[in-house]
Amino acid sequence: MQSRIGDKGATGVVREGLFSPELAAAVTGARRRAVRDGDGQVDTAHLLHTLMEADPAVCRAVNGRGKDRSVRLLGYLVQRTIGYGLRWRGTVEDSGSLPVLLGCRAPRWSPAAATAMEGAYARACARGGDRAEGVDLLAALAQDHRCRAAEVMRRAGVDTAALAADLDLMGHEVP
């Protein structure tokens, strides 16, 4: 089965029209962040970082139940960018869902990131939408307990299982 997300050449091309403008901006920003950081893959933490910056609905969802967790989470993501995540540099993020492709100069999507984007689109379709939104990707990231984004969320005090459940209960609506 061919991916709906697409991945042409070494850079990975996201098909237009599958994502909301906020999510498309986050995906583009994640790719730029990976290139700037010299990472070989665009991983789920890159996606989460730019998603938090690009989509206020995602920050509201992370905060949930009146807790202000988004600021702490962004702090952890910034720390990762400036050194916290050095142990990840040069390593492959793999949740075991797709084969890993190595040997390209420009970053490709990590298997976990590609799976999360597919999951976001599937969630959008399940709720009757034709484009995935930021909260759809956030739900997919929170559901993959082995991805880097989920690890960073947990370190920032976000209960990823509860977040995923809250997002499932809310469907598309985010307070």
Image (spheres, grey):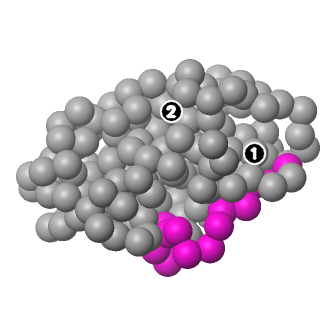
Is residue 38 toward the left or the right of residue 150 in the image?
A: right
Amino acid type at mark 2: Arg
The secondary structure making up most of the magenta span is loop
Residue lying farthest to the front in this orientation:
1
Q: In percent of the image, x 78 and y 46: which residue is there?
A: 107
When the figure is inspected, residue 118 is found, relative to residue 50, above or below; the finding is above
Q: Which residue has dot 1 on it?
A: 108
Label disc, if present, on residue 13 of the rendered structure: none
Dot 1, how many residues are within 10 Å of its Cα: few (below 14), some (14-19), or many (20+)? many
Residue 106 included in the magenta stretch of the image? no
Give SS at disc 2: helix
- Which quadrant of the figure contains the C terminus? bottom left
Q: Quadrant of residue 31?
A: bottom right
Expressed as whole percent of the image width and height from the top left, the position of residue 33 reads 68, 55
Q: Nearer the viewer, mark 1 or mark 2?
A: 1
Q: Which residues are magenta?
A: 10-23
Give SS at disc 1: strand
Q: Give the tally of numbered discs.
A: 2
Expressed as whole percent of the image width and height from the top left, the position of residue 73 reads 37, 46
Q: Nearer the viewer, residue 2 or 133?
A: 2
Amino acid type at mark 1: Arg
Q: In percent of the image, x 35 and y 54: which residue is there?
A: 123
Dot 2, how many residues are within 10 Å of its Cα: few (below 14), some (14-19), or many (20+)? many
Identify the mark nearer the N-term, 1 or 2.
1
State how far apart marks 1 and 2 are (Cα): 16 Å
Q: Which residue has dot 2 on it?
A: 148
Expressed as whole percent of the image width and height from the top left, the position of residue 4 reads 60, 56
